[in-house]
Amino acid sequence: MRVAVLGMGEAGQLYAADLVAAGHAVVAFDPAQMPFPDGVDRAESAAQAAADAGLVVSLTGARFAADVARQVAGADGQACFADFNSAAVETKRAVAAALPGNPVADVAVLAPVPRAGARTPLVVSGPGAAAVAEVFGPLGAAVEVLDAEVGAAAGRKLLRSAFMKGLAATVLESVSAAEAAGSAQWLREQIAGELGSAELVDRLIDGSRQHAARRAHEMRDCRSYLDELGADAEICEATITWLQRLEDGG
């Protein structure tokens, strides 16, 4: 299949490389002139990348998702447009509204892509969900297809984020206190013993620092979704405070 990848950040690079390795013809676009993986053709625009593609994978970031969808509208009415961005439910719906002629898939990525590349587990909803499963299932990804509209997968992702980012904030706060007490390594070992993985502890701490801005945006979306559900959001608020502190260099 001809697959277009829009956005060649860390996740886009890994997905593109794995799709090429699986035998797909991959064309990608990113406004930044970074190197692309071997075998990935460079397009001059998002619309050019999407032209004649059977599947369009959008990894542009939530802020640009709907705008990029509008840019490719009409490029090929048959292409499945798969929005892989971590975004609010309303953002996913805006993407679908921008592409009335295409089957749109709302894709929630359930783990950090650097760990497993295209084998990363997915939850997918919307008219294009089956097309995503057909491509990524054979690559080794566990793909859960929801019989639901665009936005449902995003909601699942935000619920998971409330737990995972809240857990990260708890680890950050306790380890920060342990550093002040001169017991950081001891506490990290205690947490790793409880969670069953020292690697997970490292990821919760280092990943929060490295991706603080993106995760703060995600948690604001999470708070809005919890408000919409009428659910409590105190932990979510505290997590946003931690991520904002990290984003500011704290």
Image (cartoon, rainbow, N blue to C red):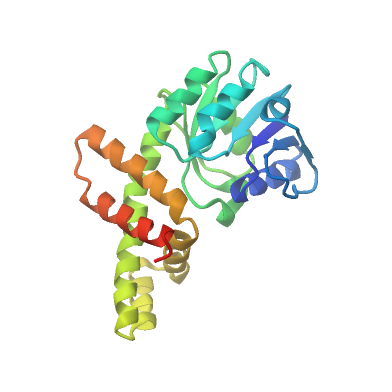
Query: Does any portion of residue 129 appear in the rendered image?
Result: no
Quadrant position of the N terminus in the picture: top right
* Residue farthest along the front direction in this orientation: 248
Point out residue 102 in the picture as x, y percentages from the top left corner.
Answer: 58, 17
* Up/down of 236 relative to 168, above or below: above
Q: Nearer the viewer, residue 26 or 244?
A: 244
Point out residue 166 in the picture as x, y percentages from the top left corner.
Answer: 31, 55
Quadrant position of the C terminus in the picture: bottom left
Q: Nearer the viewer, residue 5 or 198?
A: 5
Point out residue 242 in the picture as x, y percentages from the top left corner.
Answer: 33, 59
Q: Nearer the viewer, residue 103 or 99?
A: 99
Query: Does any portion of residue 36 appear in the rendered image?
Result: yes
* Up/down of 175 relative to 185, above or below: above
- Residue at image position (55%, 18%) is 99
| Relative horizontal placement of residue 128, taking residue 93 as reference (left or right) | right
- Residue at image position (73%, 26%) is 48
* Up/down of 161 relative to 66, above or below: below
Marks counted in the figure total: 0
* Residue farthest along the bottom direction in this orientation: 182
- Residue at image position (80%, 43%) is 39
Point out residue 235 in the picture as x, y percentages from the top left corner.
Answer: 24, 53
> What is the quadrant of residue 4 in the picture?
top right
